[in-house]
Each structure stands twice: as structure tokens, then as C-alpha cells.
Amino acid sequence: MVRVPPATPPEACTAPCAISRAMACAESAWRASPGSVTIADLAGDVDSDYGSGALAGIGAWLGPADS
């Protein structure tokens, strides 16, 4: 036999539950995080992760913009 807590009647559900609130907070933080990273930050990360010539190599690989 499986035991579960009793269901809350629909009329008592007047606000989002704790799980919904926690997930909304996490989603908000996830959506806000890219705003704190700049292109310069990303370029710096590429340089520090792969060496100073990596970014230029990626640019060469991509080719000219008018191709």
C-alpha cells in the first residue's frame, strides 16, 4: 500500500506552492546570468583556456564575413 499526503482542496490553493516558487527563482537567476557576461569576458576565457592564438584561429576558421 502506498501512502501519500492528503490533497489540498483547489480552493485552498491561492498562491504558488514552495516548489513552484523555488523553480521560478532558479529560472529567474538562470535568465539573468548571461547579462553579467560580456563578449570581452568570453574572449578572455577563450584566451586563458586555449592560448593567446586561439581566438584568432577561430576567426580565421570562420572566414571573412562576406563569404
Image (spheres, rainbow, N blue to C red):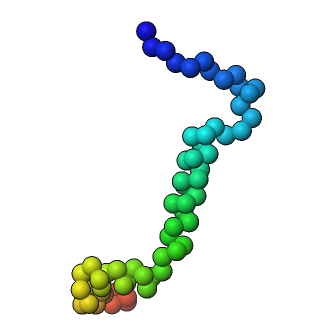
Extreme residue in the top direction: 1
Is residue 63 visible to the viewer in this orientation of the structure? no
Please give the name of the residue rendered at 74% of the width and 35% of the height, measured from the top-left corner.
Answer: 14
Please give the name of the residue rendered at 70% of the width and 22% of the height, measured from the top-left corner.
Answer: 9
Tell which of 31 and 4 is nearer to you.
Answer: 4
Residue 26 x, y percent position in the rendering: 54, 54
Asked which quadrant contains residue 2, the reply is top left
Residue 37 x, y percent position in the rendering: 48, 76
Q: Is residue 57 left or right of residue 15?
A: left
Residue 30 x, y percent position in the rendering: 51, 60
Please give the name of the residue rendered at 37% of the width and 88% of the height, measured from the top-left corner.
Answer: 65
Asked which quadrant contains residue 60, the reply is bottom left
Residue 67 x, y percent position in the rendering: 33, 87
- Please count the marks in the image: 0
Is residue 15 visible to the viewer in this orientation of the structure? yes
Tell which of 34 and 2 is nearer to you.
Answer: 2
Q: Is residue 15 left or right of residue 24?
A: right
Please give the name of the residue rendered at 54% of the width and 73% of the height, measured from the top-left corner.
Answer: 35
Tell which of 15 and 56 is nearer to you.
Answer: 15
Relative vertical location of residue 11 with respect to residue 40 in this rendering, above or below: above
Quarter of the image containing the N terminus?
top left
